[in-house]
Amino acid sequence: MRYISTRGGMTPARFCDVLLGGLAADGGLVVPESFPTLSAGELAALQGATYEQVAQAVVSRFVDDIPEADLAALIAAAYDRRLFHHPAVVSLRQIEPGFHMAGLAHGPTLAFKDMALQLVGRLFEYELARRGEHLTVLGATSGDTGSSAEYAMIGARNVDVFMLSPLGRTSPFQAAQMYTLDEPNIHNLAVRGVFDECQDLVKEVTGDAAFKQTHRIGAVNSINWARIVAQAVYHVFVYLAVAPEVGAPVDIAVPTGNFGNVYAGFVARRMGVPIRHLIVATNENDVLDEFFRSGRYRVRPAADVIATSSPAMDISKASNFERYVHALLGDDSTATSALFSGLGPASAIDLSNDQGFARIAATGFVSGSSTHADRIATIRRLHADHGLVVDPHTADGVTVGLEHRDPDVPLVCLETAQPVKFAATIAEAVGTPPPVPARFADLFQRPQRYDVIDVDVAAVKAHIAATVPATRRP
Ligand SMILES: *Cc1c(COP(=O)(O)O)cnc(C)c1O
C-alpha cells in the first residue's frame, strides 16, 4: 500500500510516513494509490463482530508497515472501555422504523473526534518510539479538535502538545475540558484573540522551516490520512449493524464541516460497502451543499463565515474536499492540481456540466443545509417524541437526513457530540440544560491551568522552546 498526493507531486510513501506528515509537499492531500476492497463475503464475515474486529479488518487494509499483532494492540488500547463508555464503543438506537442514530460520542471528550484521534494518538506514540523521535504537536482549536487531540496524547512519552485557543471564546465546557488537564506533555495556550488569529499563529510558526525542524513540529489536523482511515471503520460498523443483510443499501447522514467525517464514509463506500447515499448536512455555511446542488464549489472569504449554533461546521472551505474531487475526476492528479492550485475566495471549481453531475451522482452524495430554526425544531421534536436530546450538529444531520429519507432504505444519522458540550442551544430548544455525564460532574470545580499569551508569534515560539526540554528534541 503506497500513498500519493492528489496533485501528483509526491514520491509514493508508506502509511507510517504519511501518518507523521501533514500536507503533501506539493500542497495536495495524501490518498492511497489504489483503494483496498472488502468483498461481500468479507463483509458478511464481519457481521456481529466487535468494534475492534471491524477496526482491524478495515485499518489493516491501509497499513502494511505495522505488524498485525501490534496494530491489534494499538486498536485495543484506543477503544478501551475505560475511555469509551459504551459496551459496543458505538451505540445504535432505532428511533423510528428505518431511522437509526449512531452514538459516536461515548469517548473521553464526548465528541466523535475521539473515534479517530484515540487511535491516531496510539499510532503516533508507536511510530515515534520505533524511530526514536520526539514530536511537538502544535494546533489551534475553537472547540472539539483541541480537547480530542489533547486527550488522545495523554501519557504519550514522545509527544508534547501545544494547543492555542481563543481566550474566553470557546464554550465553557470545552475550555474546562482542556484547561483542567494536568499532564506534563499537554500545554494550553489561551490567546488574547480570536480563533483565526490562533490559526494564523500556527501557520506562522510552521512556516518557519528552521524552527519547525529544530523542534520537530507536527499537526493532527483534519487532513491527517490516519484520521480518515480510523473514521471509515464506524461507517462499516454502522452499515453492518443496520443493513438487513449484507448487500442491502443503507443511507448515512453526516453533519459536515471540513468534509472529514463524510469523506470517511465515501472511503468505506469505495471499499465496496453498499452505502447508497451519503447525505451531506451543512449549516448556514453551505459551501458544500451549494456544490452538491449546483456543481460549483465556491470558497468563501473568511469574513463571510457566519457564526452559528453548530460552530464546528462554520467553515469557508472544506479541507478534505480535494480528496473527493480527485476521486470524482477519476483519480486524475493533473486535473485535480489544475483545479486546486491557487484556489482562493475569488475562484471556483465548476463541475456543473452534465458529465460532472453524472459523476457526482455516481459517488452517492446528496446534500442539504439546516438553519438555527431547523436545528432547534429537530432537537425539540426528538426530545418530545422520543425523549432523546441531540447536540446542534447532530440535529443538522437529522434535519437533512430526514429530508432525504426513503421508506425502503434504512437511514443512519451520525451523532457528532454529546449535547452537554453545547448547553446553551439545548436549553433554548427544550427549556432545560442537558444532563452532565457523571464523569464530568465536577469539571467546573477542578483547577484550570493555561498560559495566556498575546497574538505574537515570537511569544509562541519562546513558549515552545522554553517548555520542551532540549533532551526531548531530536
Ligand atoms: C468536527 C466536528 C464536525 C465537523 O466534522 P468534519 O469532519 O469537519 O466534517 C461536526 N460536529 C462536531 C461536533 C464536530 O466536532
Image (spheres, rainbow, N blue to C red):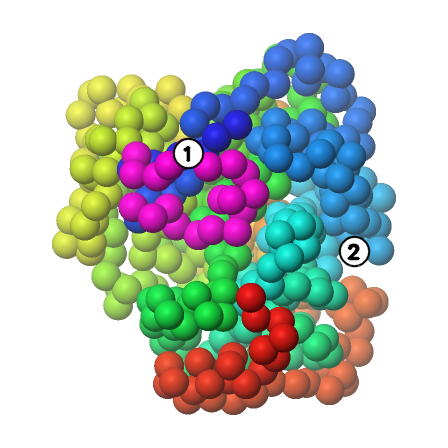
Rendered residue at 46%/37% (across/down): 13
Assign the C terminus to one quadrant of the image: bottom right
Q: Nearer the viewer, residue 131 or 422?
A: 131
Q: Quadrant of residue 178?
A: bottom right
Label 1 is placed on what type of residue?
Pro
> Residue 132 colored magenta?
no
**Residue at label 2?**
83
> Residue 15 colored magenta?
yes
As drawn, is 351 to the left or to the right of 57? left
Residue 447 in percent (x, y) is at: 73, 87
Rendered residue at 51%/81% (across/down): 465
Q: Nearer the viewer, residue 462 or 222?
A: 462
Magenta: main secondary structure: loop
Question: Which stretch appears magenta?
Answer: 8-26
Rendered residue at 58%/31% (across/down): 62
Which of marks 1 and 2 precedes in the sequence?
Answer: 1
Please tell me whether mark 1 sits on a helix, a strand or a loop.
Answer: loop
Distance of label 2 from label 1 (alpha carbons): 35 Å
Residue 321 in percent (x, y) is at: 36, 42
Residue 155 versus residue 370 in the image, above or below: below
Residue 272 in percent (x, y) is at: 55, 18
Q: Is residue 279 visible?
A: no
Q: Quadrant of residue 338?
A: top left
The disc label shown at residue 12, or none: 1
Rendered residue at 39%/50% (across/down): 23
Label 2 is placed on what type of residue?
Leu
Q: Is residue 450 visible?
A: yes
